[in-house]
Image: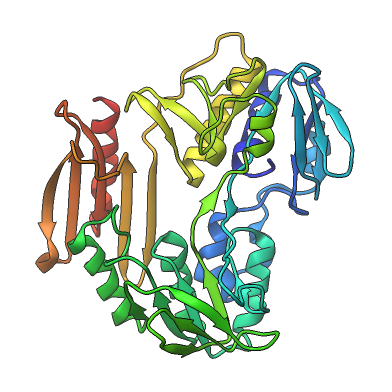
Amino acid sequence: GGGVAGTTAAETIRLSDRTGSMAIVTDEPNPFYSRIMLSKPNFFLEKIPFDRIWLKKDSWYPENKIQLISGKKAVKLQTQEKTVTLNDGTILGYKKLLLALGSRVRLWDVPGADKDGVLYLRTLEDAKKIIAKIKITKQAVAIGAGFTSFETCEMLKMAGLDVTLVIREAHYWDPIFDQLSGQMVEQAMEKGGVKIIKQQTVMEVLGGKTVEGVRLADGRQIPCQIVVAGIGVYTDTDWLKQAGLNVNRGVITDEFLRASTSDIWAAGDAAEYKDVILEEHVQMGNWVNAQTQGRMAGNNMSAASPKAFKFVSFYTTQGFGLAAAFAGDVRPLPDRQMVARGGGQNKSYGRLIVDNKGELIGATLVNRTPELATINKLIENN
């Protein structure tokens, strides 16, 4: 993986090991770039120089004695021989291996989803396709009630498109958000000009070779020239399971980010790690978590004394004049208590999530982002 977890780990290893041979394998054709910037309107509308996307220059890799193997995918792991085979047949030997695989978008499987104009937003190549399309597009449909769709809808509106959002849920971010939180997000989006259709699914993408519209389950047809599908992500673990690693949704690790087989670590979106604060295995898919885990994995791969990963993961997003944030474990499980703060009338609302031991373990916030640092500290201190 050549994203933030893998690159940060390599950078950290070089601080204590200046001579050991090192390679980063990435299935993308590019050096390390900011995935966060992909969903920011200023980048999409080309209001800032394209080169700001790069976080490492091509020269950084040889300067740090790191071989960048780009455009190649790891497809086979042999833990006894300590080798990784790439999709072009190249076999790499390792003494220590980091699995910083990141996550992949779930591909849409409705009839017509292979048409030109059905787009996703995960990689720089995805973003380039959307940037090109919005210049010749008047109407767009977005699918999904998550971060990607929220930020994509704002970008599409700022580009001057008519935007319709289709979600299966009864309200936005259900079940992570309650009804009031979700309605606040919806009101901000609708005020910004987005038409939201709830509790519906797209049954077919209409058109010839290119997208001309979508047909919903209730028979309605929505004309559009692009569809941006944000239907979730997953980690490709099948090849690791075949190698004998303990995997679930991600690679199972201990609190030191060590996998079930010796000399293998995992970090970032792919790691389903033992959280020492929540006392359970969790998998987090966000930039800050991946960067912090990459640093810890790099330290533990190269240092004499490993350190446990202890970090309160959080997400933040802004759009349509609204700021939303999640901290810690926000799953609304039956044995958890939700403590409300604020309300819809004053345009801000938060929920503190308390477990059955009476400890604060998470929070969801709408227009209360300044409370995030305090909440994170409370969660970290149990």
Q: From where the camera sits, is residue 11 visible?
A: no
Please say if 58 is above or below 154: above
Q: Position of residue 188 (x, y in %)?
A: 28, 74
**Whole-percent x and y of residue 133?**
64, 81
The residue shown at (32%, 52%) is 325
- Looking at the image, residue 81 lies above or below residue 150: above
- Which color scheme did the rendering employ for the protein? rainbow
Q: Please indicate whether residue 154 sits to the left or right of residue 130 in the image.
A: left
Q: Return the residue nearer the eye: 227 or 324.
A: 227
Quadrant location of residue 294? top right
Q: Position of residue 346 (x, y in %)?
A: 12, 65
What residue is at 18 percent from the left and 63 percent from the top? 180
- Quadrant position of the N terminus in the picture: top right
The number of discs equals 0
Could you tell whether 19 is left or right of 190 in the image? right
x then y, percent, for residue 339: 12, 45
| Furthest residue in direction top, as rendered | 304
The residue lying at 46 percent from left, 88 percent from top is 222
Q: Is residue 277 visible?
A: yes
Locate the C terminus and report the quarter of the image it occupies. Answer: top left
Please give left or right for residue 190 compared with residue 26 in the image.
left
* Left or right position of 343 against 333: left
- Where residue 377 sits, quadrant-wise, is top left
